[in-house]
Image: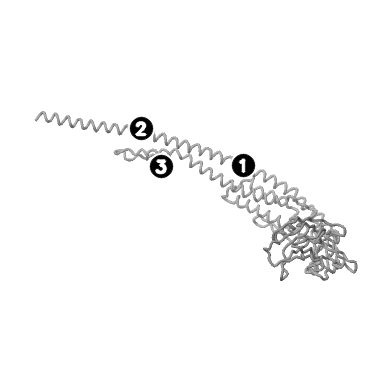
Amino acid sequence: MAGEIYFNNLTGKFDWGSVIEQLIRVKSLPLQGLSKESQQIQVKQSAISKLLQAVSGFSSHFENLDTEKLLKGKRVNISNNEVAMGVASEEALNVSLRMRVLQLAEKEVMLSNFGTQDLNANITWNNFTLRYAKDYGDFELFSVQAGSGTLSDLVNSINQSAGSRIQASIYFDGENYRILFMEKDEALSRLETDPTTNTFVISEASAMNINGVWGINYPSPIQLAKNAKITVGDSTEEIISASNTFENIVTGVNITVKKLGEATISVEDDSSGLLNFFKGFVDKYNALVSVVNQLTAKDALFQGDYTVVGIKTDLSRMMDDLFRYDLVNVKEDGTLELNSSAVSPLLRSEPSKMKEIIEKLKDTMGSYLSRTYTTLQSFDRDYQTRLESINARAEALREQLIREEERLKLEYAKVEAFINRAQEVMVRLQSFIVSLSEMQGGKRS
């Protein structure tokens, strides 16, 4: 029977340790009850935490939802993807245009006149100033301080000063190592290189001198700065861009050219964003319903608990329009199946109705999920409070048992000492009686 105490070896030396152990075991039975209660609460708290995650995931689907942007998606189709690519914003008109790419944008690349065969050789340079021309008459200046060191040291000094516009590196021409100057971003300058007119994006405002060798090799650029050029339709007028991206070539349409050639640009309505919204909606709804089903199944933790069961019931009542317009189908377990083929036709035929459906979902379901999350959080906090209370009680009981065990050990130690002394007295008495008997026996003889 649980809690019984058994005393053994009563005829021999008393086993106080065994007695104390059994007493403490009986007194610690409440700890087992607290441990069991704690485990039960932890299981429920873990289940609520899982439900909270599913609710939060579904609720996030409605956060920062821009219905207007969702319904006015646009896409750009290019007849030849090797020639160009494009993107369109919601304000773009549906148009179709023929385009010819005449020239691609390129960065200007220049070399220093100075070259060395030894990268570790010591060189000296003067104070000089580099010029970066963004357009005719519009430029930025970058000063480099005089110094000495290796070619790499000079490259680092140039990049520290002019790196926002001009990138320097080391270039090997097959015989010597030279400094290479290159535009960081071709989009920042509309100038095109023309050595015949001394037109350069990168140049010197005050000349660079390295070991007595002056300047940049202007007559022989490695690469000329070029702007991208296209024509549209039957027009022969060139449209120019400093980079390979033409912004707002038609309002809301950006085109990036990749190769010389011709292509047709078509802008049309794009329902992929809307379709992705419904796919995400169904996925997150199903994730939540699956958790609810798991927690409320027969013999499950929350079987019959309407706070949990009611989540699925309440959500299903908010989807009448989705069922009415055949946007989703419901399966046996309460999860949904998206009818993708119904999304685009409804958007085309009744865009206002599609907007109404989404706004209604956002207002009703989004708000409901937010409230449900708050309610579940209160459950989670309540479980946590109960756990902390149980742990505190268990800890107090453990400390009490430790003190009780020490007290019992002390008391039984005193008893054992007393018994030992009593036994010693009895031994002496027995010895005395034997001696006395022997003495009396001796007299009779």
User: Which residue position holds label 1?
Assistant: 381
Q: Is residue 37 left or right of residue 265?
A: left
Q: Are marks 3 and 2 in contact (CB under 8 Å)?
A: no
Q: Where's residue 434, x and y in %?
A: 18, 32
Q: Where's residue 16, x and y in %?
A: 36, 38
- Say if residue 440 shows up in the picture: yes
Q: CA distance from mark 1 to mark 2?
A: 50 Å
Against 293, is 377 above or below? Answer: above
Sequence-first disc among 1 and 3: 3
Q: What's the amino acid at mark 1?
A: Arg
The C terminus: image quadrant:
top left
Residue farthest toward the left in the current orientation of the protein: 445
Task: Identify the image quadrant of residue 169.
Answer: bottom right
Residue 414 numbered mark, or none: 2
Against 404, is 364 above or below? Answer: below
User: Which residue position holds label 3?
Assistant: 1
